[in-house]
Image (tube, helix red, strand yellow):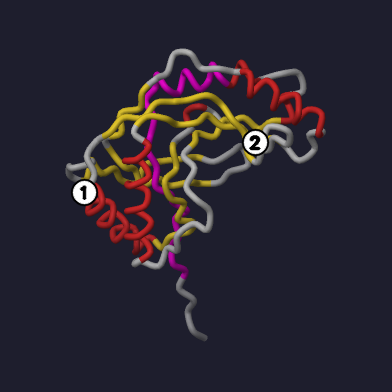
C-alpha cells in the first residue's frame, strides 16, 4: 500500500500591521459603537486588527519562501508612506449592517499601487486576484446572523453619526506575511516574515 504524504499547509495573508496607539484608538471606537444589544456583534480584538492587502488561504509550507521573495521584489519598488484612520462605516450598507469597519485615509494612491503590485506578482505564483475592488479598511466587528434588522439599522445610525476628530497616523514601512490559525476562541495571528519597503527581509 502506498504511503500517503501529507503536505503541511499554512493559512496565510499579507497585511500592514498597526502600532499600539492605533490599536488603542480602535478599542475606543468599538466602545462608542457598543449600543444596547451589541452582544449580537462579534468584536475583533484590537490586537488582531490589521490592514489586509491579500488573503492567500491555505499555502503549502514549501511555497512560503517564494511568497517572501515576491514581497521583497514589490517592497523594492514602493517607498514608505503614511495612512490615517478615518470615520467608521459598514458593509454592505448602514441600513443592513453586517461588517463594522474604520476607513483608511492618507496616501491612498500609494496603498492601491502597493496592493495592485502584490496582486499582479502573486498571480504569477498561482494566486488569482480578488474579483472585487480593493477597499482598504480595518474590521472592528461582524454582526451575528441572529441580529434583527432593527438592531442593524440602529447600529447603522450610530456608525453614521460617529466622527473621529483626532486622526491617528499609520506609518507604513513594512509588509507582513501573517499566519492565521483558527481556534474555537477565535483566530490566532502570528508573523511569518516582515519585509521593509525599500529595505530587506526580517525574520
Q: Tell whether 197 sits left or right of 131.
A: left
Image coordinates of residue 194 in percent, x first then y, are: 29, 42
Residue 137, placed above or below residue 66: above
**What range is drawn magenta here?**
6-29
**What residue do we see at 44% from left, 62% from top?**
8
Q: Residue furthest top?
A: 165
Crowd rating for badge 1 (residues with CA inside 10 Å; few <14, some 14–19, many 20+): few
Q: Secondary structure at mark 1?
A: loop
Mark 1 / mark 2, whichever is N-terminal: 1
Tell me: residue 86, above or below residue 70.
Answer: above
Say which residue label 2 marks. 142
**Which is more toward the observer, 82 or 32?**
82
Foreground: disc 1 or disc 2:
1
- Expressed as whole percent of the image width and height from the top left, the position of residue 108 reads 37, 37
Q: Is residue 103 magenta?
A: no
Q: Which mark is residue 97?
A: none
Furthest residue in direction bottom, as rendered: 1
Q: Verify whether residue 26 appears in magenta.
A: yes
Residue under pointer 1: 77
The crowd level at tag 2 (other Cα within 10 Å; few <14, some 14-19, many 20+) is some
Rendered residue at 42%/18% (across/down): 167
Horizontal side, residue 80 vs residue 188: left or right: left
* Lateral position of residue 34 relative to residue 8, left or right: right
Q: Are marks 1 and 2 in contact (CB under 8 Å)?
A: no
Q: Residue at x 49, y 84 (%)?
A: 2
For the residue pair 28 and 47, the one nearer the viewer reads as 28
- SS of the residue under disc 2: strand
Q: Could you tell me how many numbered marks the image carries?
A: 2
Q: Residue at x 34, y 43 (%)?
A: 176
- When the figure is inspected, residue 10 is found, relative to residue 81, above or below; the finding is below
Between 192 and 55, the residue placed more toward the observer is 55
Residue 89 at what x, y percent from top left? 59, 30
Amino acid at each position: 500500500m502506498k504511503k500517503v504524504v501529507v503536505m503541511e499547509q499554512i493559512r496565510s495573508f499579507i497585511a500592514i500591521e498597526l502600532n499600539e496607539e492605533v490599536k488603542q484608538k480602535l478599542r475606543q471606537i468599538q466602545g462608542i459603537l457598543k449600543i444596547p444589544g451589541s452582544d449580537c456583534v462579534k468584536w475583533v480584538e484590537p490586537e488582531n486588527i490589521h490592514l489586509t492587502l491579500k488573503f492567500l488561504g491555505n499555502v503549502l509550507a514549501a511555497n512560503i519562501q517564494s511568497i517572501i521573495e515576491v514581497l521583497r521584489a514589490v517592497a523594492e519598488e514602493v517607498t514608505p508612506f503614511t495612512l490615517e484612520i478615518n470615520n467608521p462605516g459598514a458593509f454592505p450598507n448602514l441600513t443592513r449592517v453586517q461588517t463594522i469597519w474604520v476607513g483608511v485615509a492618507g496616501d491612498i494612491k500609494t496603498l492601491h499601487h502597493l496592493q495592485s503590485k502584490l496582486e499582479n506578482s502573486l498571480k504569477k505564483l498561482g494566486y488569482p486576484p480578488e474579483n472585487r475592488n480593493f477597499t482598504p479598511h480595518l474590521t472592528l466587528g461582524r454582526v451575528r446572523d441572529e441580529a434583527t434588522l432593527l438592531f442593524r439599522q440602529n447600529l447603522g445610525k450610530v456608525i453614521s453619526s460617529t466622527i473621529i476628530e483626532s486622526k491617528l497616523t499609520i506609518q507604513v514601512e513594512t509588509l507582513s506575511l501573517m499566519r492565521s490559525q483558527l481556534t474555537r476562541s477565535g483566530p490566532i495571528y502570528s508573523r511569518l516574515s516582515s519585509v521593509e519597503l525599500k529595505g530587506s527581509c526580517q525574520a
